[in-house]
Amino acid sequence: MSEGIYQINPIGIIRSDLVSRKAAPSQGSEGAPDAWLEVDPALVEGLEGMAVGSEIILITWLHRSQRDILKLHPRGDRGRPIMGVFSTRSPDRPNPLGLHRVTVLQISGNRLRVGPIEAIDGTPVVDIKPVLPQAVDS
Amino acid sequence: MSEGIYQINPIGIIRSDLVSRKAAPSQGSEGAPDAWLEVDPALVEGLEGMAVGSEIILITWLHRSQRDILKLHPRGDRGRPIMGVFSTRSPDRPNPLGLHRVTVLQISGNRLRVGPIEAIDGTPVVDIKPVLPQAVDS
């Protein structure tokens, strides 16, 4: 089935006061803090056009995740029925990618202040995309 | 900056009548067809809870993309000012990940009929996530 293995190179890293998975809320909207995204200086040209106030989507590599889990209780709540990981936003999944819709609060060279975001300190960022105006693409 | 290189293994593949980048619209909402997503049979447990009518987000690996481009004319339109790739949805970007919000139209074993989707035939799929009810997470 798999037609290859692909390599992902982080384009940046999250610098946050959140330092453990346990302390992180499940979603940014659930009381998460703001954080810095430090973009690889070699890629800073890719930020051209980024503006304070923009809404963007960060795709992260949830490096503390387990990749061999296919079913689980959503949100770790044993009161909820077991579901397939692809029907949940669990960080534990075959390719541990995280999606985070955040607002750009400040831009300083290769650093973006963004938030709110539930990703913990040291989380690699692998892509940044604009939120599109059409609801279907957000 | 980069704290490692990560390996992505496709979890499935798109089977579509769209066979070239040139023929594909820029976004699913721009006249794209429906397609089949064939999930790796070894991962089919991860689909539990998926329902016809659900809105999901597919993350694809845009395998025909260039990874060394940092600035470009959005939508390949030379009339638009050059922007950094992270301010665009261009498939050409350091980690060529695509985001596609689609509806589940049919489920048949390890195959999901989804659409509309602009990804071309043979595009690897690397993750599936539910759209969350909160607008901030969609």
Image (spheres, coloured by chain):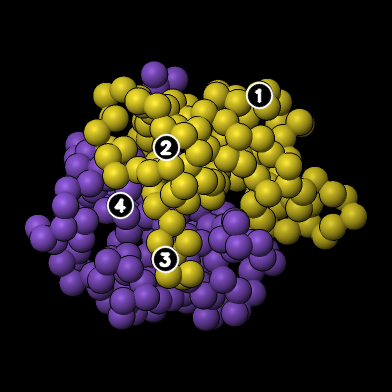
Chain colours: A purple, B yellow
Between the C-alphas of marks 4 and 1, the distance is 29 Å
Report which residue position mark 3 lands on: B133
Judge whether B39 appears above or below B68 on screen.
above
Between the C-alphas of marks 2 and 4, the distance is 15 Å
Mark 4, Cα crowd under 10 Å, few <14 / some 14-19 / many 20+, is many
Question: What secondary structure is marked by label 2?
Answer: strand
Q: Amino acid at mark 2?
A: Val
Q: Earlier in the sequence, mark 1 or mark 3?
A: 1
Q: Number of marks in the image? A: 4
Report which residue position mark 2 lands on: B126
- The chain holding disc 4 is A
Question: What secondary structure is marked by label 1?
Answer: loop
Mark 1, Cα crowd under 10 Å, few <14 / some 14-19 / many 20+, is some
- The chain holding disc 2 is B
Q: Earlier in the sequence, mark 3 or mark 2?
A: 2
Report which residue position mark 4 lands on: A88
Q: Specify whether residue B4 is in view.
A: no
Question: What secondary structure is marked by label 4?
Answer: loop
The residue located at (61%, 41%) in the rendering is B116
- Are the residues under marks 2 and 4 on the same chain? no
The residue located at (43%, 70%) in the rendering is B134
Q: Amino acid at mark 4?
A: Thr
Spot occupied by residue B120 in the image (x, y as percentages of width and height) = 62, 29
Spot occupied by residue A122 in the image (x, y as percentages of width and height) = 30, 61
Question: What secondary structure is marked by label 3?
Answer: loop
